[in-house]
Amino acid sequence: MGKILFVSDRIDKIKQYSDILKQHEFLAVDNEASTIETVELNQFDIIIFDNAINNCKNIMKKVKSITNKPSFILLTADDKIENEKYINAFLTDNMPASLIISAINLNLKTQKSLEQLSETNKNLADSLYRLNVLYSTSSKFAGSLDKEKLLNYMIEGMDKSLSFDLTCTLAFCTEDKPVLMLNSLYEISDELLSAIKLRTILNYKSLFDNPPFKIEDIKVVKTVKYPAKHFTFNLFEYDNMFAPISLGDNFFGCIEIFKETPFTSDDATCFQTIAQQVSLPLKSATLYQEIKETNHKLEKLERLKSEFISIVSHELRTPLTAIKNSLDILSCGKCGEINESGIKFLSMAQRNVERLSGIINDLLDLSKIEAGKMDYHFANMNIHAVIDYVKTSLNGLAKEKGLNLIAEETPDLPEIYADSQRLEQVLTNLVSNAIKFTPSGKTITIRSHIADAAQIVANECFKQDIEKLSGKYIVVCVEDQGIGIAEKDLLRAFDKFAQIENSLSRKAGGSGLGLPIAKQLLEAHNGIIWCDSEVNKGSRFYFALPVSQIPSEKILIAN
């Protein structure tokens, strides 16, 4: 059954159509004013216009401006039609009743189909819009690790897709107190705000037995779109939805949303989807914050450790210097003659003082390097001078242990831009280690040559360092015939305080800082260090330094 309006001033036609369409809701009007008033007050499925009525075209035009929903049917007495753009069908004066009923029913069916199509298109458009909002919101979630921003993105997505009146989001963004984020269409009075806070605690209590906070602990962050208007307590009569925000096994917060008009099932799906979508990025943001805080603590501990090492090392130096001077005075006989046993114990004490002094110097150097306070004095120099100095300095120590220390150098090597004192420190460490870990009667060899970066070959574990090289390098190698290092321990040899676990290394002792210090000193020279070894067959420690180039400061001056 349809609702039909018949516009005609012919009484016989009104009677005729009233009888024909008695199964429908039928209403007739006979002038323009009545037609306009009736259309404004009622919604019709079909309006039949009698072409014989005075000013029919204008009546149609005015009705069309009021509503687009009904089908327009024109009843005409002749074949002359002037109103085609307004009408959907035609009836003639002499048309049989059966055809009139068929025409009316067909138009009603068409009208219903059009309404269904319109509703379907509207629902489809709404769905597409919501999908776009969900996609946009997800993209924003993926691009942030800020918990407050993530919550704002969630609320923004709900606003766009659900057009809420009020959202109440309880979140534990900080450790000190929970935050209640209110996003409201209108202003909220203090009394209503207190009621909302109490409701939030009750909602929280529905999830957990005992809330770890009180109503006065809640910090409120309020955003109001139209502060000129105010909500009343009728707000609690609005339709509402509630969802917890969880981070896996942990609880982060909850959200409640209010709307004056009822929510649909699609609204509920969209609401739950956004509330769930925000959980994963919030979890990532929480983990990121924890990592940042942990890193900050580790950096602080590292800084305290370096300061502690520096202070302790300096404090040890003062008594150690006094002990060393006292031992030197005693060994020179200035305090009287010392028997053979006394000389033996004095010599032992002096050796251990030197050893302790070396450990303290290593600790100081390490703390300076890590703090970025190591002093360097770069200049163009030749590696031959460093090799000669170290060989001369340690030749006596090698002979004492029954070792042969030799140098096999490539003559006329090009210069490098380096700090000679720091390179002497690096090479002294490598040769001292070779002497320490090489049995008596063996040979230690210092070699040097020039090589292109592509020609340098190293064990697979040093591949990343080698791949960074480009250009020509001076390569220095210290080769021994000592205890060697297992392949799995090659990288570990350069770790701070590390010593390879075997009986001879434990017997040799040491701080375990020499190689890490050498590595960092060489990195300051844009060089690298690596090693190759085989257990019980000896080791080869290499370092490479770029061939000298004009420093950048000089290039700027030259230009």
Image: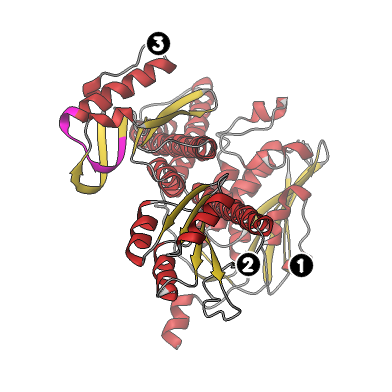
Question: Which is more foreground, mark 1 or mark 3?
Answer: 3
Element class at badge 2: loop
Q: Which residues are magenta?
A: 181-191
- For the point 42% across and 35% down, the residue is 262
Q: Is residue 247 above or below residue 77?
A: above
* Residue lying furthest front: 12
**Residue identifier under label 3:** 209
- Rounded to the nearest angstrom, the CA distance separating label 3 from label 2 is 80 Å
List x then y, in percent, for residue 558. Answer: 45, 87
Asked whether the viewer can see residue 540, the reply is no
Q: Are marks 1 and 3 in contact (CB under 8 Å)?
A: no
> What quarter of the picture does the C terminus occupy?
bottom left
Specify the label residue 94 is tagged with. 2
Q: Is residue 385 above or below residue 539?
A: below
**Residue identifier under label 1:** 454
Q: Which of the two residues, 9 or 440, is positioned nearer the viewer here?
A: 9
List x then y, in percent, for residue 28. Answer: 44, 55
Element class at badge 3: loop
Instruction: Say what amino acid the circle numbered 1 marks.
Output: Ala
Instruction: Say what amino acid the circle numbered 3 marks.
Output: Asp
* Residue lying furthest bottom: 559
Tell me which numbered mark, 3 or 2, is placed earlier along the sequence. 2
- For the point 25% across and 34% down, the residue is 220
Q: Is residue 241 above or below residue 136?
A: above
List x then y, in percent, for residue 398. Answer: 67, 43
